[in-house]
Amino acid sequence: LTSDELFAGIVERGPVHDATSDRAWLDAMLRAESALASAQAALGLIPGDAAEAISRACSNADDFYLGGLAQETSLGGNPVIPLVAALRVRVPASADWVHHGSTSQDILDTAAMLLAKRSLNLIGIDTEVAEDAIEELAQRHGSVPMIGRTLLQAARPITFGAKAGVWTEGLTASRERVGRVADALPIQLGGPVGIVDLDNDQARALAAAYAAELGLAEALPWHTIRVPIADLAGALATLCGVIDKIARDIVLLAQTEVGEVREAAPGRGGSSSMAHKHNPIAAISASASARRAPALAGHLFASMAHEHERAAGAWHAEWVPLVDLLRTAGSAISWLGDSLCHLEVDEGATATNLRRAIEQMDS
Amino acid sequence: LTSDELFAGIVERGPVHDATSDRAWLDAMLRAESALASAQAALGLIPGDAAEAISRACSNADDFYLGGLAQETSLGGNPVIPLVAALRVRVPASADWVHHGSTSQDILDTAAMLLAKRSLNLIGIDTEVAEDAIEELAQRHGSVPMIGRTLLQAARPITFGAKAGVWTEGLTASRERVGRVADALPIQLGGPVGIVDLDNDQARALAAAYAAELGLAEALPWHTIRVPIADLAGALATLCGVIDKIARDIVLLAQTEVGEVREAAPGRGGSSSMAHKHNPIAAISASASARRAPALAGHLFASMAHEHERAAGAWHAEWVPLVDLLRTAGSAISWLGDSLCHLEVDEGATATNLRRAIEQMDS
Amino acid sequence: LTSDELFAGIVERGPVHDATSDRAWLDAMLRAESALASAQAALGLIPGDAAEAISRACSNADDFYLGGLAQETSLGGNPVIPLVAALRVRVPASADWVHHGSTSQDILDTAAMLLAKRSLNLIGIDTEVAEDAIEELAQRHGSVPMIGRTLLQAARPITFGAKAGVWTEGLTASRERVGRVADALPIQLGGPVGIVDLDNDQARALAAAYAAELGLAEALPWHTIRVPIADLAGALATLCGVIDKIARDIVLLAQTEVGEVREAAPGRGGSSSMAHKHNPIAAISASASARRAPALAGHLFASMAHEHERAAGAWHAEWVPLVDLLRTAGSAISWLGDSLCHLEVDEGATATNLRRAIEQMDS
Amino acid sequence: LTSDELFAGIVERGPVHDATSDRAWLDAMLRAESALASAQAALGLIPGDAAEAISRACSNADDFYLGGLAQETSLGGNPVIPLVAALRVRVPASADWVHHGSTSQDILDTAAMLLAKRSLNLIGIDTEVAEDAIEELAQRHGSVPMIGRTLLQAARPITFGAKAGVWTEGLTASRERVGRVADALPIQLGGPVGIVDLDNDQARALAAAYAAELGLAEALPWHTIRVPIADLAGALATLCGVIDKIARDIVLLAQTEVGEVREAAPGRGGSSSMAHKHNPIAAISASASARRAPALAGHLFASMAHEHERAAGAWHAEWVPLVDLLRTAGSAISWLGDSLCHLEVDEGATATNLRRAIEQMDS
């Protein structure tokens, strides 16, 4: 077991955890180095056999010792420096062509985009799961009348379908935003000082080939213009805001005194001291996960002021919070789908609450 | 003079301040009530002469006493309640048709979108001013060689044009995001519990007419799905991140020991104790303004979990921070444009610094 | 009416608003300048009649035109520069002794501490009001049994007194923290580059006299060590967290389906569309105000990295958020006290809810 | 190697990492269960041999399978539920006395305080290391004249000793705050609904014995009054703000064009693309670590509104950010001490910069 798993079941649930592990970073950095060599060889910038040797060496992450990379990361300030050194050792005859014309930030930012793209896609799939679960609930209970509540006070009758429709609207809108960001995630390729000569056809062709190889969007270097990170932050914080809204609605509807919904997941929601308790633990965990997003997004926005041609700290301060934001969003949507899939609507309770609310209004 | 102007010259500069004043809110709420009545009359939902009377009453905000509205706001929890009461007094014969079928949140959210749209458009214009100023600087000094700096250490030579190109890239990308958000800002029209019957052609026609009247996008009610607010937060925090990057670059380049740029605005940048000081006060103020954005955006994301059919607090917690975010972004871009328009590049200093850096590398 | 009052009734309620107005800033800056001159004269550092003239000129803030100061603030980057100029005009014979040996930051930081001290004292008083209101509720209903709720599910019986005791515990602990911070708020007196020679008895005596004159704590210059601001941020965010806890408990207890408490303030809590509504608007406004604190505190912590001997932006970025935090905390506690003073406990509802919860547990 | 170590060398450096590992949590939870049993036995509340058996079972964390606990955590929403089950299996004859009268939150909150206390003590020690390093630098270079800089512009001469004194002042003040918080960290002991009968001498004696056993402060239950967490957040964000100030000063002083200091740590600070680079990577990493604190503290403040007698999400949302904040503060101070211990002051550069600044002022 790794050292930070104890709370992962609550706030880092779902597939994004593995998609952003150290191993996933290693894979992505190697993919970036490999794609760079391939693209350069295709344009005749480095020898073809060097590119093949480099790509071969990059193809198996198991050859690299993550523990060592982690330790050496603190010497140069990022994990690409020791990775490039380790890669050169593996291809002695082509060592000079490894990482050719590139800089650490090119590889690390590109790797971050690869991880983010995979994570956003996973989040998109889990969002669809949640939307489908709402759709199914709406088909079963859509026409059930219930009291609408404003400022947590009984207001006017609505239907469960109307409430479900609002939930769906939020998830769909957020999923579209996440998807748009995922589709636009760019390569990073700027070299030592992040400058590409736009009049240079070769430079542009290289960027195109590198992007095509990796399935990322072409882009000018954004070493110090962190708009892609900001786009991620905005879309994920938006999604988490919607998730938290729905999760809290579920928790409120599941209150003992309201009782309109119930999470019916066997073996879950118990208490260490009270046997009768039945806590909506999936919705609670979705909310707990989602609540972490605003501060993480705020941090990423606050880290955008990268000095000159590479930042002294603001870049380094992005890495862990970016992973945390991807994971907590992945956890939130995974839990929300779980809650919705197990949700039971108590039509008797909705009817009772509605009747009482109307009586109270009329009195 | 109003009571909160002392620091406005630093962190609330520019036209967004007035575009989000109490008076602007009053105008926008009245515009929303008027558009609602007109759209309802056009569909035959309320009498035409009632709509005309209402629109006439709404057409002059001077008839309403802002001080009274502000005081009564605290009684019901929002300013629409006293405004509707005041409006009804002005159209006694049509009082029943005022605010017909609507709820406070419809009017206040719509008003917020009107203010935001105007503010984003102003911000977009000021961003173009800043981009033009960079373009002009680039035309004058684009080919000037200077040292590129990574982690605040001399790295490799670049040109001033390359640095300017990165700045422009950031502003253009952010301006496009702000523009896309502005174009999509929606009406709010959901009635007491935020529910529109989508099978109801009349409801949809009313939304379309209301949107057309106001120049906002059509939308399903989003009383508790705060995605439009989140879109605003994301786009403005992104823009402010870019502004802060450029502003800090200017401050760093203007350091006494670097001296590559200088803000040449007569009568500005002095000190209360040191006559020789020449502070790049426009860039500093741009940075100070921009730095407020991440926390404000984070707050708006954190306020997205609106309970049930209207929130008990999360909605009320949005209003002032939304205004603050619009203003601080407006201030940041206004100051940045000012700094860039007055910026002088000292080609002698860039040459000296470059030469020294190269000597140091070679030694 | 000033331009930003429309929402002030909700999120800037109470006396802290006026205690942090532009006029309050002007008064405090003048008090600082006056105290500086007096302290210097007492030590023979400036002529006694100059100090008297300066203090006289400082004694009436009405002689200064706030509008002009606000406009000129943007020229030098802070309001002290134009204020000192205006003050010198008023004491032509002693002009050279005005602001003697001081810097803008000395005066502005000292003024901020004076405003903060007054605000914290007001907040402390309003916190005691809220504590007294809880005490009174506890005396009336302390032994009333009610269901305790964990994770918003019925758990075990408690009494209203037990719940009230937890509320009090939170307010008392927070008030003590706020009080400790208030008592330790320091003067600022460092001169142009924030350096005091500690071997210099005169410098230390001056700091002591200046502090005594203003009722602030003595301190070494903290121009770039923003610990006093951080202390404020921590204490107020803590208080607001406690307020939000209590306010949300009230909103939850006031839910139609729970109905254990009710805000009985005549003429308040109505709706623009639903006449039967009775919203706990004081608790909602307390929560809305309190929720703003975490982001504001986070911003102030993030603004602590002041460069070298005076910051280029981080200092300027503190001013408005500090005022906002003081006001929103003041608003939160003012509203909470109001809610608690008007709170009615429905002992019938607590009994019914408790009985139902126990029946459900046993079944 | 564990799964999240790749960036730990940069932003989770130092001993706090291990002091907050899953294993540390397990140890602390077992210590809490053991102390509870011992304290209860001492008061005759449970049989002495049951307490001995429980304490024996708790004394070796190796008997518990962390992987299993982590997996089961997601079923009940916290790790105490499966831990108590596993503990009962190990003491079949005393199973009923395990976790007697306690609730999950008692154990988890107490464990969090044990971890926090250890972490704060480690942070305190590392802060003293940094203070000592400054002291040593001041002894060597204290009287060296250098230019003071305000708004990043040359202002007036100071000495290196004056600057170092400001740094020390900030660290000492922060360390005292951290120490005060550490000394006051309380036990948690409230039982199922967080209520202790204060008239009950036994309950008070139990709290005293439990606190004494654990070396924590006595306290009323604070299940939903998160002031101890807020105290931690405030003190650590304050410390990190001071660290970031010093770290950025070092980075600015180390700029190629300034060159007044240099981190002389062999084998560190290199670049993947530029052999001549010498980056002040310790100061950069200190800054990167410290910058994470404001958002984490803001999140913890925002998580204070715990509903009723136990929160539905806000509590769960605290755990990981609390660990992250402890670690990032630990990392920041560890890196800062490292930077300061390796810092070389270039007295030639300070003299040159000072001379040039004075020439420029006079011209």
Image: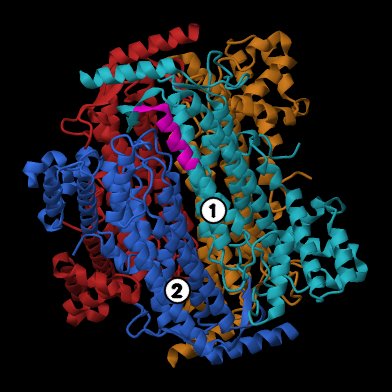
Chain colours: A orange, B red, C blue, D cyan
> Going by the image, does B194 lie left or right of C53?
right
> Going by the image, does C268 lie left or right of B294?
left
Along the line of sight, the residue nearer the viewer: D25 or D265: D265
Residue A272 point in image, percent of width and height: 75, 69
The amino acid pointed to by label 2 is Leu
The disc placed on residue A151 is: 2
Q: Are marks 2 and 1 in contact (CB under 8 Å)?
A: no
> Going by the image, does D11 lie left or right of C188?
right
> Going by the image, does B62 lie left or right of C149?
left
Residue A202 appearing in the image: yes
Mark 2 residue crowding within 10 angstroms, few (<14) / some (14–19) / many (20+): many
Separation of residues labelled 2 and 1 (CA atoms): 31 Å
**Does residue C354 lie above or below A208 as drawn?**
below
The amino acid pointed to by label 1 is Ala
Q: Which residues are magenta?
A: D158-171
Kindly report the secondary structure that dominates the magenta region of the rendered protein.
Answer: helix
In this figure, which residue is indicated by the disc labeled 1? Answer: D233
Quadrant occupied by the N terminus of chain D: top right
Along the line of sight, the residue nearer the viewer: B124 or D169: D169
Along the line of sight, the residue nearer the viewer: D46 or A219: D46
**Does residue A215 lie above or below A293 as drawn?**
above
Residue B140 location, quadrant: top left
Residue at left 53%, top 22%?
D279
Residue at left 18%, top 81%?
B92
Mark 1 residue crowding within 10 angstroms, few (<14) / some (14–19) / many (20+): many
Residue at left 22%, top 52%?
B5
Residue C164 point in image, percent of width and height: 53, 79
In this rendering, which labeled residue sits more in front, label 2 or label 1?
1
**Does residue C128 lie above or below D178 as drawn?**
below
Quadrant occupied by the C terminus of chain D: top left
Q: Chain of mark 2?
A: A
